[in-house]
Amino acid sequence: MSEPVHIAAIDAGSNAVRLSVARAYSALDIEPVHVERYPLRLGESVFVRPRFSEEIFKKAAKAFRHFRELMDDFGVTRYRAVATSATREARNRKVFVRRIKQKSGITLEVINAAEESRLGREAVWAALGPEAPPRCIVDLGGGSLEISILRDRTVEQGAQLAVGTVRLMTTLELPGVIRLAEAEQVRRYVRALLESKLVPRPNLGESIAVALGGNAETLANVAPGPRQHGLPTMELSLLRVRLPDILRRDVRERMKAYAVRRDRADVMGVAAITFLTLGRYLNLRTFALPGVGVREGLLQEIAREAFSRKEPHRYNAAARQLLVGTRSFARRMGYEQQHAEHVRELSIQLFDQLQAVHHLPAHARVLLEAGALLHDTGHMISHRGHHKHGEYLALNGDIAGLEGRDRAVAAALVRYHNRKSEPAGHHTAYSSLNNADQRVTRRLAAILRIAEALDHSHRQRVLKIRASFQRGAVGLQVHASGDAREDLRDAHRSAELFEKEFHVRLYFRQSSAE
């Protein structure tokens, strides 16, 4: 296992500032270590007077100094700190960002609404896995309501509404008991902005809808529904029944009745009205709560970058000669050039995209290319058992530049390029390798097997591959020219070694060629 990287994410929202520290072993294996919340309500003054006060500056400096100390204590080497709605709207945000840097050393990035929504989506996709793709993701924060209507992983409709809970509470002056007329005013604000920004009106019915943020989590405790895909839910019909009780209480009574903090109790009523209005507009009965948000999206990206190769692959003279010699030998064996070269190209795309998972050294990429070029050379001897014949030819043929351990790895890749044979200690090439090289071989064979299957038709329909990482799963988005269903079916069947070696599930999606 690779040495872990300690990473952190900070989300400076409108209602509070939060820190998450994690230990990342790969892009897929991220272990939470510490979470801290600092009760700094950036939106309280900004939504009335669009400037941060000097008091906010001082409180923010104290919060970020504390976070810096925590990050140092945990040995954090990579982090990203972002600020959202309230800071975006503050006219003195540049001074605020500079002050944070001066007082804490933390670089704070003010992100736009689109980036905020994207990070939330990334967190949801990583948390839910491929079996439960959401149709809708909503994030109700202190400053705004972000809505994404999805088809697979594509945003069909998106909107940002200025109806965050702190914003409405402060602008409409609703700090405590909310009378019926005031509740109707909140509902009309939310409904009006939905009708102006989310057109045409989506009808989601029984689709999976996900809600992010502390407002949703608080209300899910008040109006819990049946679990969906292992996730807690907020039942809107039950929330509607309990709404009058929430609205008639003042902040102190809500704190006692619902066991919530003051800065959550004062916005509960506004949040409940907003979710009920949204549910009616989208024709939803429940919201599932994955318990993630912007910070988890940040951690996913930081981990991916930490374990991904940044510099381009530059082969030295020996590696280039190895490929020249391998290609020359494959040509003499009458290889099907278009298919072999396409499998080679798909292999290195997969190698590069999956660097954050496999952690293989750069030289392994060259051996993967060699195995791809040689994988079908055994057909020269016989179509039946060609994987075994190819292994023999790779071990004993005259291949300039391919010697010793490299030759054994390449020969083993030829043997294991399809589902006919699994790595075993009695196979000639594989048995000659030490444990570390056997592990490299298995991982390369798992990649080669997927690449070869993606050209099962020998028609070079799959052009480009993009990897994404979810909870216990790797997604491969395949850009194809024409109908690649035959290739994708074979790739699904060829995924077993990959899933066994990397302890993940592998799934595929096809999109049109770019």
Image (cartoon, helix red, strand yellow):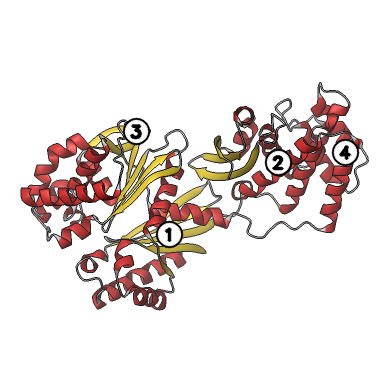
Q: Do tag 3 and tag 4 residues touch (Cβ < 8 Å)?
A: no
Amino acid type indicated by mark 4: Arg
Q: Residue at x 87, y 33 (%)?
A: 334
Name the spot of residue 466 as percent of width and height, x first.
Answer: 58, 45
| Neighbour tally class for label 2: few under 14, some 14-19, many 20 plus, Cα within 10 Å | many
Q: CA distance from mark 1 to mark 2?
A: 33 Å
Sequence-first disc among 3 and 2: 3
Q: Do tag 3 and tag 2 residues touch (Cβ < 8 Å)?
A: no
Sequence-first disc among 4 and 1: 1
SS state under label 3 = loop
Amino acid type indicated by mark 1: Ala
SS state under label 2 = helix
Circle on res. 207: 3
Q: CA distance from mark 3 to mark 4?
A: 53 Å
Q: Residue at x 48, y 41 (%)?
A: 471
SS state under label 1 = strand
Q: Please say if 12 is above or below 26.
A: below
Circle on res. 9: 1
Q: How many marks?
A: 4
Name the spot of residue 376 as percent of width and height, x first.
Answer: 80, 32
Q: CA distance from mark 4 to mark 1?
A: 52 Å
> Quarter of the image containing the C terminus?
top right
On the rendered structure, is 338 left or right of 471? right
| Neighbour tally class for label 4: few under 14, some 14-19, many 20 plus, Cα within 10 Å | some
Name the spot of residue 340 as percent of width and height, x first.
Answer: 77, 37
Indicate the quadrant where residue 107 lies.
bottom left
Q: Which residue is mark 4?
A: 331
Q: Residue at x 44, y 48 (%)?
A: 122
Q: Which residue is mark 2?
A: 444
